[in-house]
Amino acid sequence: MVKSKQIIDLTLVIVCRGSEILLGMKKRGFGKGKWNGFGGKVEAGERVEEAAKRELLEEAFIEAGKIEKMGFIEFRFRENLKEKLAVHIFKVDEFSGEPQESDEMISKWFNTRQIPYLKMWPDDIFWLPLLLRGKKFKGKFLFDKNENIVSKELKKVEGDV
């Protein structure tokens, strides 16, 4: 009997303000010690956009105004090929509130020319520049147990992601 793959829908929000982006240092759990956007699991009955806005509010205490889906990436890890992380990536450039530290994240603004890629997931250097240039994208990344990229596919797309 072949077990089916488990797909976990996740969101990731990148907040932009002029020539800056807001990133969060993950304090615990998956991705601890890395700078990242804000996001998490889509809850049962929740639309992906609603989940993105909720996670941003929970992790950075800011409320998203206009939210635009920019990308979709499937992540898998060699040690657990049955599980696929389906990440819906959004850009927010209209928001209210000032970012604050939460139980999960420490928020910090970075100039887009000084993004700390070496302290982020290794795939970010491939797709984040596309998002910052207003380009939409789809991709797939496979990681090994040391969080190195084993294989990748990434392409720009026109229209909806």
Image: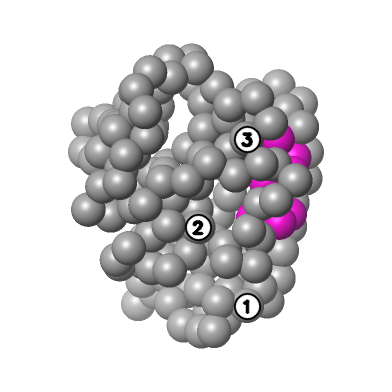
Of mark 1 and mark 2, the one earlier in the sequence is 2
Which amino acid, mark 1? Asn
Q: Nearer the viewer, residue 147 or 43?
A: 147
Which amino acid, mark 2? Trp
**Rendering coords of residue 9 (x, y %):** 39, 47
Could you say whether the residue bearing mark 3 is in a helix, strand or loop? Answer: strand
In the depicted structure, whether residue 85 falls above or below residue 101:
below
Closer to viewer: mark 1 or mark 3: 3
- For the point 50% across and 53% down, the residue is 36
- For the point 71% across and 71% down, the residue is 151
Does residue 140 show up?
no
Does residue 126 show up?
yes
Could you say whether the residue bearing mark 2 is in a helix, strand or loop? Answer: strand
Dot 2 corresponds to which residue? 35
**Rendering coords of residue 140 (x, y %):** 64, 57
Do the numbered discs 1 and 2 sit on residues whose CB atoms are within 8 Å? no
Dot 3 corresponds to which residue? 20
- For the point 73% across and 28% down, the residue is 134
Which mark is drawn over residue 148?
Answer: 1
Of mark 3 and mark 2, the one earlier in the sequence is 3
- For the point 22% across and 53% down, the residue is 103
